[in-house]
Amino acid sequence: MIAAVLVEIGKPLEIIADIISQPLRDGQVKVKMIYSGLCRSQLMEIDGFRGEDKFLPHLLGHEGVGIVLEIGKLVTRVKPKDQVVLSWIRGEGLSEPGAIYKSKKGVLNSGPVVTLCSEAIVSESRVYKLDHEVPLPVAAILGCAVATGAGVAINFQNEIRDKIALVNGLGGVGVNTLLMAKNFNPKLIIASDIDRNKLNVAQQLGFTNLVDLTTIDLKSQVDKLTYGAGIDIAFDSSGSVAGIENAFDVLNKNGLLVFSSHPKYGEFMKIDPFELINGKKIIGSWGGGLPLEETLKTVLPFYLKNLLNLDSLISDVFPLSRVNEAIELMRLGKILRPVISIE
């Protein structure tokens, strides 16, 4: 098999073509990969911003779509020839540690899910049988960007309905939060980012209350748009400590901030504890806060009814041989959500 492998932090991925996988354990599934998504969390992993990496060299990939080739003895949720979505978010089924691979470079590690490879050995709990007709490049981003971004909006739909909402940070996760939140009828929804290109994407999707943080501060614009009422619920996926702090700052006295972003390892945020005592709330969300099955069973009907425009989120499709080019363009903010074609 062939795979994109992280050999050294801060260096381009190496395409290794002589990889040999080991026999399946009881709770594992072997998948022929078709497409893989590429998310900012993986960029942080490549750049060393998620702390010490004790498993180098290792395979990568958190979301994708493929066809089941083989299943372990105890696997019951999928069978060979099933089309499946792969995700880092744990779902139903057995959970196994990552597989070990061999190559001329020696032993290669992997986690419970990998997707940037021609054949992935993954845990049963990281695959979801796809029974709907969904374009495969779109299916490739269901496991991370959509599951996290749309999932967090689903999880807090009651807090969104008839309230003033903010989505701060419009990468793959943030745009999905924005799109799904719209379906829960907020009184007003505001979107903000430091990247004009991402704001343009939101505008093309029909959103009008946009804040360009390079030209105006968030608080003054929120005060203007809400007539001083402030934000009832804010979602932050900016990936920065400053973004979380700014989103917290614009909440009204009873507002809630939910952040699903992942700032650099070792950074800390500062908030006024008196504001917490006075009624503001802040919580983190891991992968949207819902099991993978629950999120996708809710998301897919919205997509199939044209109420969730996921097709517009696919920036470009790159072959696996150009994965480092896609990574660099994403790092520079020139593309939103690249998809890697494995075949």
Image: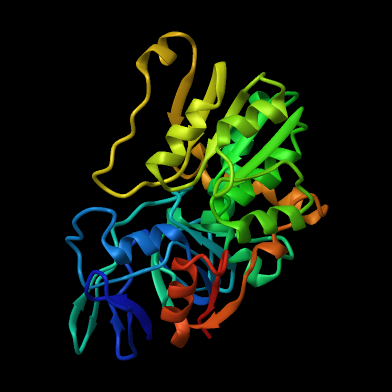
Q: Position of residue 295 (x, y in %)?
A: 60, 44
Residue at horizontal 41 percent and vertical 73 percent from the top: 120
**Image quarter of the N terminus:** bottom left
Tell me where residue 216 sits by quadrant: top right
Q: Which quarter of the figure has residue 123? A: bottom left
| Depth check, front residue: 331 or 18 | 331
Image vertical order of residue 76 relative to residue 69, above or below: above
Q: Most extreme residue toward the top, as rendered? A: 278
- Write down the quadrant of residue 226 in the picture: top right
Residue 73 shows up from this direction: no
- Residue extending farthest to the front is 215
Q: Does residue 174 show up?
A: yes
Residue nearest the observer in this picture, 6 or 26: 6
Residue 105 location (% of width, % of height): 19, 86
For residue 252, above or below residue 15: above
Give the colour scheme of this rendering: rainbow
Query: 107 left or right of 19?
Result: left
Taking the spot 18% from the left edge, 77% from the top edge, the residue there is 107
Query: In the figure, 29 relative to 228: above or below?
Result: below
